[in-house]
Image (tube, grey):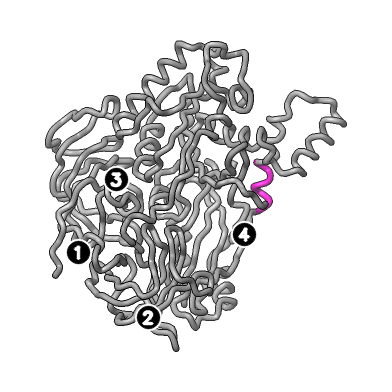
Amino acid sequence: MGKVAAVLRIMPESAEVNLKDLEQSIRKKVKGIQDVATEPIAFGLQALKIAVVVSDDEGGTDMIEKALSEVPQVGQVETIAVNRMI
Amino acid sequence: MASVKPHLNLAVIGHIDHGKSTTVGRLLFETGAVPQHVIDGYRKEAESKGKGSFEFAWVMDNLKEERDRGITIDIAHKRFDTAKFYFTIVDCPGHRDFVKNMITGASQADAAVLVVSAPDGVQEQTKEHVFLARTLGIQQLIIFVNKMDSVNYDQKKFEAVKADITNLLKMVAYKPDDMLFIPASAFQGVNIAKKSDKTPWYKGPTLLEALDTLKEPEKPTALPLRLPIQDVYSISGIGTVPVGRVETGIMKKGMNVIFMPANKTGEIKSIEMHHEEIPQAVPGDNVGFNVRGIAKNDIRRGDVLGPVESPPAVAEEFTAQIVVLYHPSAITVGYTPVFHCHTAQVACTITELKKKLDPKTGQVKEENPTFLKTGDAAIVVIKPSRPMVIERIKEIPQMGRFAIRDMGSTIAAGMCIDLVQKQLR
C-alpha cells in the first residue's frame, strides 16, 4: 500500500489556549508528526496545522483525527488535504 | 516559486496499478519539475556507471526515496508548469476511506486526468473515481489511456477501451464527445510531451497539449452566499466569532445574514482573514467574522450562513444519486448511516430505493430495487434525523455533495438531485 501525505487543521477550544503548550501535548499524543505551523485565523485566534504521513489503507485519517480530538484544549480537527505520495 | 500563469488544481484519478504514480512522475519529469538535486544525483551516477537510458526509472526511484525523508506542510504538494498554466497535483488516495476528505476537504480539483490501463480497461475503481469526480464537481476530464506499450500500440485496443470509458462517462452525465482521449505510455514517455511515431494513427494532442486546452474555472461568486460553520468562538472584546470557508457567493461587511438550520439572523460587523480585516470574503477564503445579534450558543458547526433574502435550504427529505463504495452486506430501506455534508454530520434514513442504474449504460436497470450492494449506483430518497442544510447539485454544487459513513467505513458517496424544503418560519 502507498503512503498518503495529510495536512490537518486543529482549532483550539478557545482563543485563550496557548498554542505552544497545545503543540507539546499533541506531539506527545500523536507520533510521526512531520511538520507543524500556526495559521492565523481572525481576531487573534490561531489554528495549528500539521503534516503527517499515513498509509493508503482502511480508515483513512480517522485514527489520527480521533487521537487529536482527545487531546485536552483541542476544539475541531479537520483534514484539509490528502495527497498520495509517489 | 512565483508564477504569473493561472493556477489549476489537477486531480489524478484511476484504478490502482493503472499507472497513476508513473504518470505523475512523468509529468514532473517532462516539465522540469523534478527537484534539481535529484537530476544532479542522476547525472553523477550516470557518469560514474555509464548508463544513460534509464533516466526516468532512476528519477522515479529517487522521488520515492524523497518521501521517506519527511514532508513539510508545503511540499505535501507537487507542482509543475505547462505553457499556459501552473498546476498543483491532487493525487487522490486509492482507499475509499479518504473519500470523506476529498468531499469535505479544501483542495477542490479544477480538472482531472483519468488514468486507464489499455490492457486492463475499465475496472471497479475507474467507475468509482469517475462517479466521485462527478460528485466532486470536476467538470473537465482528460482520459489518459496508459500502458499502450503493453498492447503494442494497437489502435483497435485503444478504440475498445475508449468506447467503454465513453459509456461510463455518459452514465454520470459527462459529455465524453467533448473530452480528449490520449493513447499513451507514461513509462516510455509516449504522447506526454512529444508525439510518438509509435502511434501514427493518433492525430490528437499530447498530454501536455491537452492540459493547455483546459479552462480556468471561475470562482462561484454569482451564486448566493454559502458559508458552512466550522467552529464558533466567543472572543473577549469582540463578541461571537464564527469561523469557516466561503463556498459560494460573497460575504460583505454590513450584510444581513441567516444561519440555518439554527434559524438565527444577524448582521456582519467585521470580517478577518489571516488576522487582517477585509471588506468582503470570496469563495475559498478561510475567515472569521463578527456577527451582531448572535450568541455563541445560538449556532454550531454544521450550520450554514447565507443572505436573509436567500437562506440556505433545510431539507425535510431529499433525493440523491449515490454510488455504493463498500457495504459488507446490503443496503435496504430503513438503513440509517451518518451523512457527511459540508461541515455537518447527520444521521439520515434511507426511506426509498427508487432506481438502480446500470454502470455500463447509465440506463435504469431496476425500478424500486429491494436492496443495494457494493458497486451499485442508485437513486434514493433520504430523510435526515434532524434538520440539515443541503442544496440541489444543479443549483449550488458546492453544497450538494456528501459521503456516507457507518461503523468507521466509507459506505457511499452521493449528490443531492432534489429536495423537499422544511418550512421553518
Which residue is the site of mark 1? B386
**Which range is magenta?**
B64-70
**Residue at 20% in and 40% down:** B379
Is residue B142 rendered to the left or right of residue B320?
right
Q: Which label is found at residue B240?
A: 2
Q: Position of residue B220 (x, y in %)?
A: 39, 53
Residue type at numbered disc 1: Arg
Q: Report, in whole angstroms, how far the alpha carbon at label 1 lies from the one at label 4.
A: 39 Å
Q: Which residue shows up at 61% across the image and 20% down it?
A: B195
Magenta span includes B136:
no
Label 4 sits on a secondary structure element that is strand
In terms of depth relative to the viewer, which is nearer, B356 or B80? B80
Q: Are marks 1 and 4 on the same chain?
A: no
User: Mark 3 and 2 residues: CB-CB less than 8 Å, in contact?
Assistant: no
Q: Quadrant of residue A32?
A: bottom right
On screen, residue B137 versus residue A25, left or right, reads: left
Estimate the spatial distance between the alpha carbons at disc 3 and disc 4, rounded to whole Å: 33 Å
Give the mark nearest the N terminus, 1 or 2: 2
Do the dots labelled 3 and 2 sit on one chain? yes
Q: CB of mark 1 within 8 Å of CB of mark 4?
A: no
CA separation in Å, label 3 and label 2: 34 Å
Magenta stretch mostly in which secondary structure? Answer: helix
Vertical side of A35 occupied by A17: above or below:
below
Q: Nearer the viewer, residue B342 or B126?
A: B342
Secondary element type, mark 1: loop
- Gap between marks 3 and 1, in whole Å? 19 Å
